[in-house]
Amino acid sequence: MATKQPAVSAPVDVTRFKYSNRVVLKTILGSRDGGVGLVGKRVVIGGWVRSSKAVTEQPATPPLPLPPPKTDERVDETGSKDVSCVEILQSRIPFFRSILKVFGGGNYHLREKLEQVIPRPPGPPPPPSPSIAFLQVSDGSCVACLQVVVVAAVAPISQLLPTGTCMLVEGVLVQPSVLGKHVIELKAEKVLHVGTVEHDKYPLSKKKLPFDMLRDCSHFRPRTTTVASVTRISNALTFASHTFFHNHGFLYMQVPIITTTDSEGFTEKFVVTTLFGKAVKMGKPNANTKIEGISLEVIKSAVNEKSNLVEELKRSDSNKEALAAAVQDLRKTNELASQLEAKEKSKPGTSLKVEKVNFSEDFFSCQTYLTVSGRLHLESYACSLGNVYSIGPRFQADCAKPVAEMSMIEIEMAFSQLEDAMSCADDFFKFLCKWILDNCSDDITFVSKRSDKTCIDRLQSLISSTVEKVSYNDVVDVLKKVTDKKFETELEWGAALTAEHLSYLVEDIHKKPVIIYNYPKQAKPFYARLNDDGKTVAAFDMVVPKAGTLISGSQNEERFDKLDSRIKELGLPREQYEWYLDLRRHGTVEHSGFSLGLDHVVLLATGLTNVRDVIPFPRSHAKADC
């Protein structure tokens, strides 16, 4: 009975990358048949070795073993052996060789047969050198690797085996002789490039490094399968964001990374200046810097604030890294306080003088910061173009936060109110979840096996669920009535909702995403529109199970007098916001928008637990290696 052969799809052409001669592996391995339809095609592929195996090639037809020599061996009465035929031949081989030389070298086969009767020296034979390498090569375009088979005649096997070796290989796609995990492999005919690896120094030589160790080598992390999948998912989310907003008539713009305005009004900011570098090069303080006294009481007050922060982090569910950063910050402040105290004791009646920079001599001639939020700048374009959005890095110099730089997606819409912004946020979030499932199935399946097997079901649930909208007042009332849970932080009206409160609300009470709106004005940025009660503002947060707050937004204050009053009430430097007030003076309009943390959505989708593992080069307190 004839064996039925597996069906092979019709041959198709391979698509080469336009800007090099190689074929991206996704075009081979990403097809429905796994690349079987490309059998027989000659391709050039490039990538890095993920794993390898070397074997010794066995001859197709091994030579028949020689029959054992007939020795006719006997033992005499004294116990000594008769001389065997082999020993006789061994003693006569030089004689036979001499005869062969006389006849012009003699017959090779005769000489070979004569030497074959000589037994091998005692001990095991030396191990043969590997002659075939089976390499699992990845170029980062997909989860799967292509098996590349290289024989020793093509390239030195030892150079190709270490993990991380870079290769550019030309060969023919064939089906493996033994079908198993791979349905297609590349039989290498030329190795065009080899980037060798120093095995002892290469951090990924060890298998299954934990994430906290991978963070110490961010420049090599994308070579791991998990981080590569996370990067492709993040890329897909960025593309999905552009697609969503393009489909709904938004215009993309980039907001400045350097700004003169505190976008939130109360956040810790990074100062941008060139003066300190100039002073260091000159070997002395800037000649135009002003001197101003700082008292010991100010430093001691900072110590108390930082001590309270450390205690709060100990009581909350904050990660250990945030707590360690806060403790380190407190220690440094204590050291500064000790130095000040010692100097004041040595010179009674004096206080330590420190340099205060005169920013009129700086590059921008004024004090500037890394931007915390781009929504204020987006407003100026929304008030001219209607609907705009931006994607980019945002910065906060807050030791309690796990990272100092995050990727944010921010939008602003003219002629829209709070309800419009909440509706857009809900649609946008579900669009992202669906996009991941539709376009990142291989990556999300792989990551789910490594981190959280429920993440695919969770995304599907989020798509089909209806978001619950609850006012801040109702949230406080509901949480105060909870009897089966003792919160570490007692909740009172006006206080910020902690991660513990939010988690219980969405996971135990509603069991689905919740939008909380109409927050107390002291809990939200100064620009949120004041409600008629004078106590709350038209702001909202979208809270998701297992992820926390993913989106924060508001209807912004379009009334000049109300916004001006809020700036004065909070004691903000008015000169920083004159341009922002101008938008109310000239053609004011109702408008609203929101911000979404892209990195936190990646965290939700992959099931990973630390945001530093989904950011390509995470920056955090006391940590910025490259």
Image (cartoon, rainbow, N blue to C red):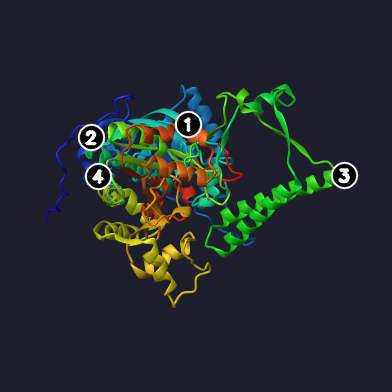
Q: Counting other residues with Cα less than 10 Å from the Cα at mark 3, is it few (<14), some (14-19), or many (20 or more)? A: few
Circle nearer the N terminus (4, 1): 4
Note whether 420 is above or below 505 in the view shown. above
Query: Which residue in the structure is indicated by mark 3?
Result: 348
Q: Earlier in the sequence, mark 2 or mark 3?
A: 2
Asked if disc 2 and disc 1 are in contact, CB closer than 8 Å, the reply is no
Q: Are marks 4 and 1 in contact (CB under 8 Å)?
A: no
How many labels sit on residues? 4
Residue at mark 2 to residue at mark 1: CA–CA distance = 27 Å
Secondary structure beneath dot 1 equals strand
Q: Nearer the viewer, residue 320 or 548?
A: 548
Give the image location of residue 5, x and y in percent.
16, 49
Regarding residue 252, the answer to whether it shows in the image is no
Above-or-below relation of 572 to 445: above
* Depth order, front residue of 432/277: 277
The residue nearer to you, when weighing 202 against 107, is: 202
Q: Inspect the image, locate mark 2, and give the three-letter code of the amino acid beneath it.
A: Gly
In the displayed structure image, the side of residue 588 where residue 619 appears, left or right:
right
Circle 1 residues within 10 Å: few <14, some 14–19, many ≥20: few
Residue contact at pointers 2 and 4, CB within 8 angstroms = no
Identify the secondary structure beneath mark 3.
loop
Which marked residue is nearer to the observer: mark 2 or mark 3? 3
Image location of residue 356, percent across then percent down: 68, 33
What residue sits right under mark 2 in the picture?
A: 40
The amino acid type, in three-letter code, at marker 1 is: Gly
Q: Tell me the residue that label 4 is attached to.
A: 34
Labelled pair 1, 3 in contact (Cβ < 8 Å): no
Please identify the quadrant where the C terminus is shown: top right
* Residue on which the image places disc 1: 195
Give me the C-alpha separation between circle 2 and circle 3.
89 Å
